[in-house]
Image (tube, rainbow, N blue to C red):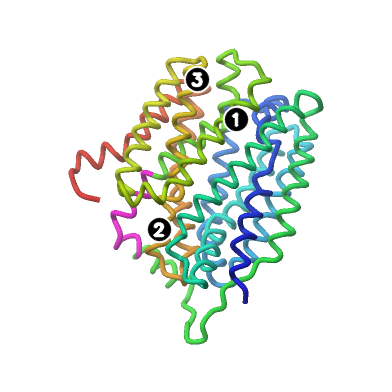
């Protein structure tokens, strides 16, 4: 079984999976179809709830039957989401589409990175996992940037629906390429364990690694802040009085500044350590969000870019730490648990962010996110215990 081929296939799949021109006008498209900020946040909560339900089962399935079928199904469900969104005009149609996306995301979240690690291990290159993960992230960002710039131009000349049609085509290419992936062969001496035992071992793994759990929490909070920023930057620019023609350029800059973080994460980790880097990311993100909340103009928009610049190295750092310690038999399951925790926090933070943004303003919601980013760091300082 040629697992080495998986590496370039995963790079290619990441490129086409991210080549989605619909993203650059997503919030505007949704607003045009009658979706308010609170409606959008409610769909995010639905997304989180579906992920909560399917996250761990998806990881268990990936570890038991193989990563390839799980990846193939996940990409297919993501494509179904775009097909539904193309004609959606009510909250519940958007909600159903997002539920499909959540199911696809749950299937992909642990399986892709687990297959990457398995493929690298087959050629004794597992120590370069975070190096490849950073570069796959860079490929994904370049693809998003191409989609953003082209999508912005298309939106000015044609209807928003064209962006969604092109997105469906790109997802279809990623789906076809996923059919050529290969799975790791299970050694004959490796006896399968029960599902409950697999869950018990996963929980015990996190209990035995409290330092890793702390790093995961830092990554989760930074990821949430960056995620909501990426979701609502379009409305922020509109409130700041920035013209639509600049949206594509701004999104391109947003994506471009995340590339250095992903590429340099491995080298910076070796020099400064994961925890120090993540502390810097948290502090930078919190200050940038608070600054943007008080200065709703080009300077505030630059603050959002600073946050995303810092958060660009979060994924390689956090997942690299996780996979270095993970057992091959439950690699996807462990990452699914990490994603499960992310979505648990998403439900709570998303509810607060949605309420504050609707009752007061979007910038007040950003300020709340900045404060929440500091919570795990402050808790750690108050306890004064080493990670």
Distance between the alpha carbons at the discs numbered 2 and 1: 30 Å
| Callout 3: SS | helix
Q: Label 1, on which residue?
A: 251
Element under disc 1: helix
What is the distance, in whole Å, between disc 3 and disc 1 at their CAs?
27 Å
Q: What x and y, as percent, mark residue 298?
A: 52, 16
Q: Residues within 10 Å of mark 2 (few under 14, many from 20)?
A: many
Q: Please rate how many residues cluster around mark 1, counting C-alpha atoms within 10 Å: few if below 14, some from 14 to 19, many from 20.
A: many
* Residue 11 rendering spot, x and y as whole percentages: 61, 55
Q: Earlier in the sequence, mark 2 or mark 1?
A: 1
The picture places residue 40, in percent across and down from the top left corner, at: 60, 32
Nearer-the-camera pick, 47 or 135: 135
Distance between mark 3 and mark 2 Cα atoms: 39 Å
Q: Quadrant of residue 276?
A: top left
Which of 61 and 282 lies nearest the eye of the viewer?
282
Question: Outermost residue toward the bottom?
Answer: 189
Secondary structure of the residue carrying numbered label 2: helix
Q: Is residue 208 magenta?
A: yes
Crowding near the residue tagged with mark 3, few <14, some 14–19, many ≥20 C-alpha atoms within 10 Å: few
Q: Which residue is mark 3?
A: 359
In the picture, measured across the screen, residue 34 lies left or right of residue 103, that is right
Tell me if residue 300 comes above or below residue 58 in the rendering. Answer: above
Query: Which residue in the structure is indicated by mark 2?
Result: 322
Q: Residue at x 56, y 66 (%)?
A: 62
Instruction: Determine the residue positioned at 51% across, 22% down.
Output: 301
**Mark 3 or mark 2, which is nearer to you?**
2
Q: Earlier in the sequence, mark 3 or mark 1?
A: 1
Mark in front: 2 vs 1: 1
Q: The magenta stretch spans which residues?
A: 205-218
Q: Residue at x 65, y 60 (%)?
A: 9
């Amino acid at each position: 079984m040629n697992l080495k081929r998986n590496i370039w296939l995963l790079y290619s799949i990441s490129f086409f999976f991210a080549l989605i021109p619909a993203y650059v006008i997503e919030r505007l498209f949704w607003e045009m179809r009658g979706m308010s900020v609170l409606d959008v946040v409610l769909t995010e909560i639905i997304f989180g709830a579906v992920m909560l339900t399917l996250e761990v089962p998806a990881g268990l399935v990936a570890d038991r039957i193989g990563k390839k079928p799980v990846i193939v199904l996940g990409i297919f469900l993501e494509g179904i989401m775009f097909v539904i969104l193309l004609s959606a005009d009510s909250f519940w149609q958007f909600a159903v589409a997002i539920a499909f996306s959540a199911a696809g995301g749950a299937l992909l979240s642990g399986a892709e990175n687990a297959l990457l690690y398995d493929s690298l291990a087959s050629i004794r290159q597992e120590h370069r996992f975070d190096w490849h993960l950073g570069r796959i992230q860079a490929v994904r960002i370049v693809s998003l940037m191409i989609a953003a710039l082209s999508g912005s131009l298309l939106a000015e000349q044609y209807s928003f629906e064209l962006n969604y049609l092109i997105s469906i085509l790109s997802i279809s290419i990623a789906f076809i390429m996923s059919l050529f992936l290969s799975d790791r062969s299970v050694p004959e001496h490796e006896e399968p364990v029960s599902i409950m035992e697999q869950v018990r071992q996963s929980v015990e793994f996190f209990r035995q690694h409290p330092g890793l759990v702390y790093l995961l929490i830092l990554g989760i909070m930074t990821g949430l802040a960056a995620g909501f920023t990426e979701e609502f930057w379009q409305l922020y620019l509109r409130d700041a009085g920035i013209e639509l023609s600049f949206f594509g350029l701004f999104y391109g800059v947003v994506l471009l500044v995340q590339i250095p973080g992903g590429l340099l994460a491995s080298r910076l980790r070796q020099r400064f350590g994961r925890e120090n880097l993540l502390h810097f990311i948290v502090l930078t993100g919190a200050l940038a969000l608070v600054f943007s909340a008080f200065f709703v103009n080009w300077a505030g928009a630059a603050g959002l870019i600073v946050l995303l610049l810092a958060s660009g190295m979060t994924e390689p750092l956090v997942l690299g730490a996780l996979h270095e310690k993970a057992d091959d038999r439950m690699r996807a399951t462990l990452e699914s648990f990490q994603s499960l925790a992310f979505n648990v926090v998403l439900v709570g933070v998303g509810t607060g962010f949605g309420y504050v943004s609707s009752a007061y303003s979007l910038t007040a919601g950003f300020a709340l996110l900045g404060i929440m980013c500091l919570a795990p760091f402050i808790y750690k300082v108050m306890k004064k215990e080493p990670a």
